[in-house]
Image (cartoon, rainbow, N blue to C red):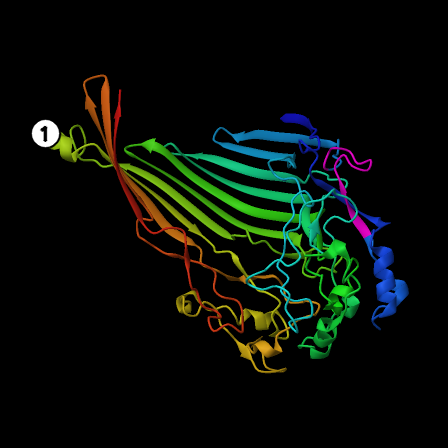
Amino acid sequence: MNLGLRWEYESAPTERYNRSVRGFDASVSSPISEAALATYASNPDAALPVERFSTMGALTFANTGGQPRGLWETGNRNFSPRIGLAYQLTPKMVVRAGYGIFFASLGVDKEAPIQTGFSQATNIIPSIDNGLTFQATLANPLPDGVQMPSAVGPATYLGRGISFFPGKRPNPYSQRWSLNIQRELPGRALFEASYVGNRGTRLYVTRDYDFTPAEYLSRSPERDQATINYLTAQVSNPFFGLPEFAGSNIAGRTMSRANLLTPYPHFNGISAPDPMGYSWYHSFQARFEKRLSRGFLVSANYTWSKFMQATEMLNASDPLPTEVVSDQDRPHRLTVTGLVEIPVGRGRALGRDMHRALDAALGGWQFQAIYLGQSGPPIGFGNVLWRGTGPEDLHRLVLPKGQRTPDLWFNTLASSGPGEVGFETNNSRSLAQNIRTFPQRLTGLRADGHNFWNASLYKQFRFGERFRMQLRTEWEGALNHPIFAAPNTAPANTLFGQVTATQGEARRIWVGLKLMF
């Protein structure tokens, strides 16, 4: 039995000159609040009463305005217990088990400072009235001049997209546990079977805090044109003419109603990591190993697993991330490695008394091969319009392996209207401004997996006692088997369901000569 306890402490990273965003304070009023409210009150939109119009919130910066230099507050309770057990049931059989907690790092190798406000991009704004007139030309694309960084503060990056660090950032951690049985077999071989599990906690999810509230979005299973027209309609921009918005994405005379209704209309998107994600993994793992004897060795590993995660938002307004099969899920994985000393040459089964000159060419070769077979990743879809009544309809998308080709990777069921199972392929009837319900990925529908061989052939030459030379040739992807990329998943695209690319590289062959002394 092994018992252990590990404690980790990771201090918050700092930027050498404190040139970094730290957080976002939603309780402070923006410096443009009074002017924006007066402008809005003169021409309000019926969807947003004047008393509900709000421009609260501003970025905070490291070592500024009472903020510390550290980019966030860190935790100090990262205790990691470890337990290991091993018991010899018989002289040739051992049982092992273990449990441990492992914390992930959040240091500078994982996160870079957010230097919003310390560098300034100048956007080209060709028109401020949706193309009725144009202020930017090819001769003068930046009529308002080049935007220069100014002293950071509450007005920094108004009208632009921003991101920030949460005030407190606990370290993500994984709980891992395993149970293993290992048995020694005759011929210098062994077999083992294991169960391995993992639970990830406090995984970071990128959240959008500046979204159109769900109450305004459509919940219709079909395209809701009335809602789309309502939210995309252009309304008077209460920030027009304010110098803080010059050159930003919302500097025009109008803005969409969807943008006006967001919690922070004076920004063009706000995102930050949130430690509310989690994952879980279960697997059966088997291993067979025969060590080198009688001129050959072989090792085989097989894993059967399921990997689920909740680290992505299906809708920005959802309170929690969606639970879905992980994009890293590979249910089956098999690797086999073998090495054979070819029994030809002096002192071997064939050609025991072979002439030395002939032995130099034909004797002493070794052949090695590695095979990898692995399931492909689950296929993901966008916010598609799917007409189906349950899981049994989704199962119809999967084609038998023998029928699957790059020209048709899955069954592209097309639907022309309600009551007909399939995807809506008419782009004019696609979904928009709606609450999404179709899952991000389908576990039963997968892209191409791995199925390839690597091989090598090599021979040692000895010159006296000091010198050895190795001649070696290696074949990566020996059978030149392609690995197809994921198929197109846009129903309105003419390539829907087709594979248009491969991933990885084609077969590569090396020949090398190495001298050792």
Query: Which residue does the image show at 50% across and 36% down from the upper left?
Result: 182
How far from the left and from the top, in percent, is residue 51?
90, 64
Which amino acid type is marked by label 1?
Answer: Ala
Residue for point 54% across, 46% down? 284
Q: Which residue is mark 1?
A: 357
Q: Outermost residue, right direction? A: 51
* Residue 14 place in picture, x, y as percent: 69, 33
Q: Residue placed farthest to the top in the image? A: 465
| On-image quarter of the N terminus | top right
Q: Position of residue 167 (x, y in %)?
A: 77, 41
Which residue range is magenta in the image?
A: 57-71
Q: Is residue 486 at all visible to an observer of this figure?
A: yes
Image quadrant of residue 198?
top right
| Left or right relative to 511: residue 399 | right
Local SS, label 1: helix
**Where on the picture, by quarter, is residue 144?**
bottom right
Q: Is residue 64 magenta?
A: yes
Tell me: 500 left or right of 445.
left
Q: Main secondary structure of the magenta part?
A: loop
User: In this view of the protein, which residue sits in the foreground, 323 or 332?
Assistant: 323
Check if residue 500 falls in the magenta segment: no
Let me know if residue 213 appears in the view: no
Can you say whether 302 is above or below 208 in the image? above
Q: Residue 247 versus residue 461: which sits nearer the camera?
A: 247
Q: Is residue 511 above or below residue 462?
A: below
- In the image, 325 versus 302, the foreground residue is 325
Specify the quadrant that holds the C terminus. Answer: top left
Image quarter for residue 209?
bottom right
Q: Measuring 59% from the left and 53% from the top, which residue is drawn there?
A: 326
